Amino acid sequence: MYNAVVIAPFGKVGVQVDATAGFVREIVYLDDSIPASAPDSALAERAALQIERYLADPTAPFELPLADVGTPFQRRVWQAMCEIPLGSVLTYGALARQIGGVPRAVGQACGDNPFPLVIPCHRVVGANGLGGFSHHGGDGFYPRVKRWLLMHESNQLALAL
């Protein structure tokens, strides 16, 4: 199902690519029950290496060809998320005001993001706390992933100061 499964501190990261067309189809967070798997193509290897570099150093850039997906509104939200600086967060409401939308629609677009890590949806939080993540709330696996990513980025920023 995945062209590569990368081990992460919070579980695993699965990568789906279209090696023939030359783009990444999807990046997903996976729990520890999914076995790691080596990349099966050059593009999957490129994606896996960039994910591994980010997990070691959140300042590592992503340079991957991504599938051209999403509605125009989702793409605006995703572009705005890419502009949130490392170690910073925006609320759903602030992001909505920035792009001319409403918080609930921004939250939906964040949850629909097919390229987490590359498009840092974890940097968008609720007005009164963490907010959801990948259409999941509460204290389960996905909120733990979001917390880890935010800590990973903020710790790296603190070390750089």
Image (cartoon, grey):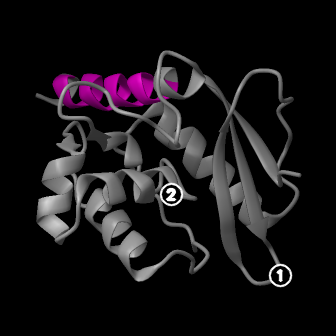
Q: SS class of the residue under badge 2?
A: loop
Percent x, y of residue 133: 46, 37
Residue at image x 58%, y 59%? 114
Q: Please give left or right for residue 49 compared with residue 158 in the image.
A: right
Q: Position of residue 45 (x, y in %)?
A: 74, 55
What secondary structure is the magenta-colored segment mainly? Answer: helix
Q: Residue at x 66, y 59 (%)?
A: 26
Q: Is residue 152 magenta?
A: yes
Left or right? Give the position of 75 relative to 84.
right
Q: Which mark sits nearer the N-terminus, 1 or 2?
A: 1
Foreground tag (1 vs 2): 2
Up/down of 102 relative to 142, above or below = below
Q: Amino acid at mark 1?
A: Thr
Quadrant of residue 79 within the rendered picture = bottom left
Q: 10 Å neighbourhood of mark 1: few (<14), some, or many (≥20)?
A: few
Left or right, residue 48 beside residue 80: right
Relative height, residue 138 to residue 81 (above, below): above
Q: Could you say which is closer to the camera, residue 26 or residue 46?
A: 26
Distance from Cα at disc 1 to Cα at disc 2: 23 Å
Any part of residue 9 in sight: no
155 or 123: nearer the viewer: 123
Q: Which residue is mark 2?
A: 113
Q: Which residue is mark 1?
A: 20
Q: In terms of secondary structure, where does tag 1 sit? A: loop
Which residues, given as a range, are shown in magenta? 145-158
**Callout 2, which amino acid?**
Asn
Q: Position of residue 68 (x, y in %)?
A: 57, 81
What is the quadrant of residue 5 in the picture?
Answer: top right
Q: Residues within 10 Å of mark 2 (few under 14, many from 20)?
A: many
Q: Residue at x 31, y 32 (%)?
A: 153
